[in-house]
Image (spheres, rainbow, N blue to C red):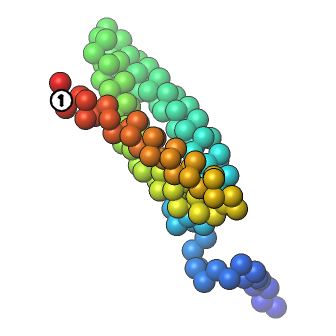
Amino acid sequence: MASPKNLYINQFGNTSTVHSFWIEAWNGQFELWRAFWICLIFGHGIIIGLGLGLMFIAMSLGLIFIPNSLNAGFFGLVTAGSILGVCYSVFAIWVSVSVWRAAKNCVNRCWLIVARFTMIVYGAGLILPFIVWQLD
């Protein structure tokens, strides 16, 4: 006897066949509270925690392989910092778009304005240091 197939009940009218957390957030299919608190706030905690752990491990590995040279530790630290910078940039773009698009999914229009204003300030906070750095 063949095993029973999974039954999917389309109670919300979704026609999409892909149900990925990342894609649903990017498309703005989350509630605003979920996009803001889970993706933005807790996501930053996860990225910072993993990033600091990666930097510590990379610096330690550099010092373990060449114990007489601090340059090996610095090399590991710079390498991990570069990887963290790339990962954080991708995360920042994803979370900004996710919260911006999810802002329309709230009942009170006031939260739409607050969420989008927060994303404008967040984006400015990420971009302005690079602009100031280029001007110096």
Res 136 quadrant in image: top left
Question: Mark 1 sits on what residue?
Answer: 135
**93 or 109, nearer to the observer:** 109
Identify the secondary structure beneath mark 1.
helix
Q: Residue furthest top?
A: 68
What residue is at 59 percent from the left and 79 percent from the top? 17
Q: Is residue 34 above or below residue 125?
A: below
Residue 131 screen position, x and y as percent: 25, 35
Give the residue at x 63% y 64%: 105
Task: Please give left or right for residue 69 compared with residue 19 in the image.
Answer: left
Q: Nearer the viewer, residue 71 or 117?
A: 117
User: Residue lying farthest front?
Assistant: 110
Residue 25 at least partly seen: no
Image coordinates for residue 43, horizontal then vertical, percent? 57, 43
- Amino acid carrying label 1: it is Leu
Query: Which residue is located at x 38 percent, y 31 percent?
Result: 80
Query: Which residue is at the front of the view, 80 or 18?
Result: 18
From this view, report whether residue 101 is shown above or below residue 66: below
Q: Is residue 115 visible?
A: yes
> Outermost residue toward the right?
1
Q: Quadrant of the N terminus?
A: bottom right
